[in-house]
Image (cartoon, rainbow, N blue to C red):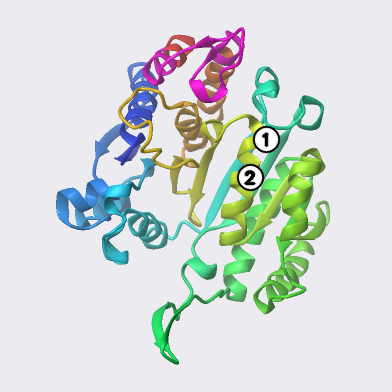
Amino acid sequence: MKIAVLPGDGIGPEIVAQAVKVLDVLKSDGAKIEMETAAIGGAGYDAAGDPLPEATLKLAREADAVLLGAVGGPQYDTLDRPLRPERGLLRIRKELNLFANLRPALLYPELASASSLKPEVVSGLDLMIVRELTGDVYFGQPRGIEIRNGERVGFNTMLYSESEVRRVAHVAFGIAMKRGKKLCSVEKANVLECSELWKEVMIEVSKDYPEVELSHMYVDNAAMQLIRAPKQFDTMVTGNIFGDILSDAASMLSGSIGMLPSASLDENNKGMYEPIHGSAPDISGKNLANPLATILSVAMMYRYTFADLATADRIEGAVKKVIAQGLRTGDIWTEGTQKVSCSEMGDAVVKAL
């Protein structure tokens, strides 16, 4: 199993290094894995003048899975838009056809007090957000900034084809079947024709999954309900821009965005695995970042791409153990727990393994 390791920018190299420690343990235990590192994002631009260098894309295509850190930094904000780090991330998703983004939001009991909501509201939370990743307003054409009537006008196109909605719907229904058999489809069909099509296709696909209870919710209400009563949801499915926003909101339910992994899959379950947080340039190089989302992303890699559920459970069990031991990076630290650095947290997970 070949893994392309793309540390990226900011805290990316620090958190990916901890996940690689975990992979090294599995390798020493006999796992047949091979890792190769390449640059992406700002690091790709610095190395090759491109946020997604051709060599990185070639490696990602040849690999069975991709482990990504984070991209971006203020030093790249003045670059032409096609050269900015985030464009490399969008391009690799599109080039690898990674259309289904899985973002779990799970609250460990010990972290209930770290959530910004009352413990009784979030305790027992176990939510999966399925986000369509290669369509919508992020990729729709036409787009740009131009002069109209003597002033600048920016425009983007929200666009979904029936087949794009249908394929992510099947992924979401399949995941709901393995969970609580409840799927909430989030859109804005009362205003957007794009969402109207989304809703129609979801209803059509639901006929293939009669055991799953399908509900519909407008995105503004869904944002409110995630904060008001998040445990009403089991599995959610939504488009690219709505999923981007809602999954970040859901991250705070679990105590910290540093706790949430993600998987981005193609039709054959080849995937790119990454924490959902950004490059956090304010703490970059200070050994302060939380590596647990990246380590849990490795668990998702084993669960979805390598179909090795025992190893996935083993990694997740190690994370649960260090949390139960009271070890905390700064983002989830509370009185009475032990504050540790990024590398110390990685070492603790390795020891728990």
Q: Can you give x and y, in whole percent of width and height, for residue 74 in the image?
A: 32, 48
Task: Give, as a single range, the part of the protein colored magenta.
Answer: 322-347
Q: Which mark is residue 330?
A: none
Q: Which mark is residue 253?
A: 1
Tell me the distance, in whole angstroms, between the alpha carbons under discs 1 and 2: 7 Å
Query: Do we see residue 40 in this rendering?
Result: no
- Looking at the image, the residue that sits furthest to the bottom is 149
Q: In the displayed structure, would residue 158 be above or below residue 207? A: below
Amino acid at dot 2: Ala
Q: In the displayed structure, would residue 305 be above or below residue 15? A: below
Which corner quadrant of the image does residue 336 belong to? top right
**Does the magenta portion include 167?**
no
Q: Residue at x 33, y 21 (%)?
A: 24
Which corner quadrant of the image does residue 87 belong to? bottom left
Amino acid at dot 1: Leu
Label 2: few (<14), some or many (≥20) within 10 Å?
Answer: some
Say whether marks 1 and 2 touch (CB < 8 Å). yes
Is residue 248 shown left or right of residue 348?
Answer: right
Secondary structure, mark 1, is helix
Q: Residue at x 61, y 39 (%)?
A: 251
Is residue 224 shown left or right of residue 14?
Answer: right
**Does the magenta portion include 330?**
yes
Which residue is the site of mark 2? 249
Is residue 311 shown left or right of residue 4?
Answer: right
Q: Can you give x and y, in whole percent of width and height, for residue 306 in the image?
A: 46, 37
